[in-house]
Amino acid sequence: MNGYEVLNIPANATRDEIRAAYRELARRWHPDRFLPGPERDWANEKMADINAAYRLCLNGLRDAKVSAASEDEALKRAQALIDDGQYQSARKLLMGLGTRCAEWNYLFGWVLLHQSDTQKALIYLSVAAHQNPNSVKYARALKEAQSRGSVSRLQALFGRRR
């Protein structure tokens, strides 16, 4: 059962939107509004579906909050691994996350930069800076990657001429 479809709300609905949709449907389909008989039985079934959908949607909100909190903790662990110079462990942790937020892109780009994969690092750090253009940290990391990329291109250019 898709609770959001039953309540006729978008999948990104807020708690207030979920509650309002539930209340509207509960007022319309509550079995006490129907005379005893087949209509009331049908309303009982409909109300059971509405109640189940409401619980599913609220549980989905709670699970999303728990998931977001655990992903925030994982991003902090990845930062700690990077700070300790454990770039491969940080990379593995980041690859296991479902989020691709600005912080994730920054951390992954930073790992790539320290693993001397400057071109890929530039991509991820550019995405982080684009996702959060007000972040000085992301802009600084992008600038460093760009300067390292320029140095490596110069080294490649001068290395070929010899």
Image (tube, helix red, strand yellow):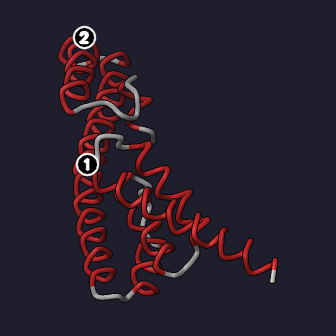
Q: Residue at x 32, y 75 (%)?
A: 78
Q: Residue at x 44, y 39 (%)?
A: 2
- Tag of residue 131: none
Q: Which residue is mark 2?
A: 35
Disc 1, SS = helix
Q: Quadrant of the C terminus?
A: bottom right
Q: Is residue 31 visible?
A: no
In the picture, measured across the screen, residue 31 lies left or right of residue 115, that is: left
Image coordinates for residue 24, horizontal then vertical, percent: 24, 15
Image coordinates for residue 43, horizontal then vertical, percent: 32, 22
Image coordinates for residue 108, horizontal then vertical, percent: 45, 68
Image coordinates for residue 97, horizontal then vertical, percent: 42, 67
Q: Residue at x 44, y 59 (%)?
A: 105
Closest to the observer, 151 or 16: 151
Q: Amino acid at mark 1?
A: Asn
Q: Amino acid at mark 2?
A: Leu
Q: Quadrant of the N terminus?
A: top left
* Upstream in sequence: badge 2 or badge 1: 2
Q: Residue at x 23, y 52 (%)?
A: 65
Q: Is residue 18 visible?
A: yes
Q: Which residue is mark 1?
A: 59
Q: How many marks?
A: 2
Residue 136, compared with residue 78, is above or below; it is above
Q: Which quarter of the picture shows residue 55?
A: top left
Q: Which quarter of the picture shows residue 23?
A: top left
Closest to the observer, 103 or 153: 153
